[in-house]
Image (spheres, rainbow, N blue to C red):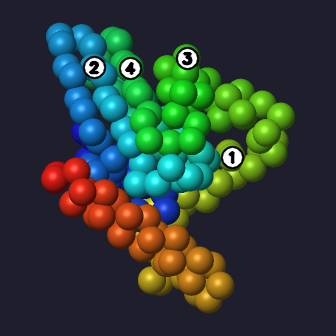
């Protein structure tokens, strides 16, 4: 189930990227601890992951607790996702109204069509997605090495 949660920047599973640090399961409840590869991972992308994860876990467990660690907004993200808040509710005035929903929609369209940085026609977008995604993967791999995963 966790393997099907995809990072919007890399189109890789959060399990493959080493985001999942801990899982505690009991009958009808689960606790998952996530840590993105960088302290400054964009909250928008991370929230897409958190919403997808929460939705998938809620289909199997009655009680779901997701904890974010190692991020500049860990406390806020943890609190908001566990309350079931939408991104705009979590970030209020910090969020540009409608931007998150548009970003999320575009991610799922990209995922559905299998569009990765390698097969985009817009050179600048392709370059940006490629650099960001590859950097994220490299940071995740380095972190996993340091942590001995």
Structural distance between the alpha carbons of marks 2 and 4: 6 Å
Q: Residue at x 52, y 71 (%)?
A: 132
Residue 27 left/right relative to 49: left
Label whose residue precedes the other's in the sequence (2 or 4): 2
Mark sitting earlier along the chain (4/3): 4
Which residue matches tag 1? 100
Compare marks 2 and 1 and give the one earlier in the sequence. Answer: 2
Q: Residue at x 55, y 17 (%)?
A: 83
Indicate the position of residue 37 as horizontal and vertical percent values.
40, 54
For disc 3, the neighbor class at 10 Å (few under 14, some 14 to 19, many from 20) is few
- Marks 2 and 3, the one that precedes in the sequence: 2
Residue 122, above or below 51: below
Label 4, residues with CA under 10 Å away: few <14, some 14-19, many ≥20: some
Q: Which residue is mark 2?
A: 30
Question: SS for tag 3?
Answer: helix
Res. 140 in view:
yes
The answer to whether the residue labelled 2 contacts the one labelled 1, judged by CB atoms less than 8 Å apart, is no
Q: Are marks 4 and 1 in contact (CB under 8 Å)?
A: no
Q: CA distance from mark 4 to mark 3?
A: 10 Å
The residue that disc 3 covers is 83
- Dot 2: element: strand
Residue 145, compared with residue 15, is above or below; it is below
Percent x, y of residue 149:
17, 52
Please tell me whether residue 23 is drawn above or below residue 8 in the rendered image.
Answer: above
Distance from the alpha carbon under mark 4 to that under mark 1? 23 Å
Categorize mark 2 by other alpha carbons within 10 Å: few (<14), some (14-19), many (20+): some
Q: Earlier in the sequence, mark 4 or mark 1?
A: 4
Q: CA distance from mark 2 to mark 1?
A: 27 Å
Say which residue label 4 marks: 65
Asked whether the residues under the numbered discs 2 and 4 touch, taking CB atoms below 8 Å apart as contact, a structural biologist would say yes
Looking at the rendered structure, the number of numbered marks drawn on it comes to 4
Label located before the other in sequence (3 or 1) = 3
């Amino acid at each position: 189930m966790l393997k099907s949660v995809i990072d919007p920047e890399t189109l890789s599973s959060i399990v493959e990227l080493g985001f999942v640090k801990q899982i505690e399961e009991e009958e009808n409840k689960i606790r998952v601890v996530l840590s993105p590869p960088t302290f400054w991972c964009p909250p928008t992308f991370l929230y897409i992951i958190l919403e997808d994860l929460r939705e998938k876990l809620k289909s199997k467990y009655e009680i779901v607790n997701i904890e974010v660690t190692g991020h500049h907004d860990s406390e806020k993200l943890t609190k908001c996702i566990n309350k079931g808040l939408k991104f705009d509710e979590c970030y209020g005035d910090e969020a540009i109204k409608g931007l998150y929903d548009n970003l999320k929609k575009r991610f799922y369209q990209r995922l559905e069509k299998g569009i990765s940085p390698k097969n985009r026609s817009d050179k600048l977008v392709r370059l940006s997605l490629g650099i960001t995604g590859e950097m994220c993967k490299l940071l995740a791999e380095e972190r996993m090495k340091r942590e001995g995963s």
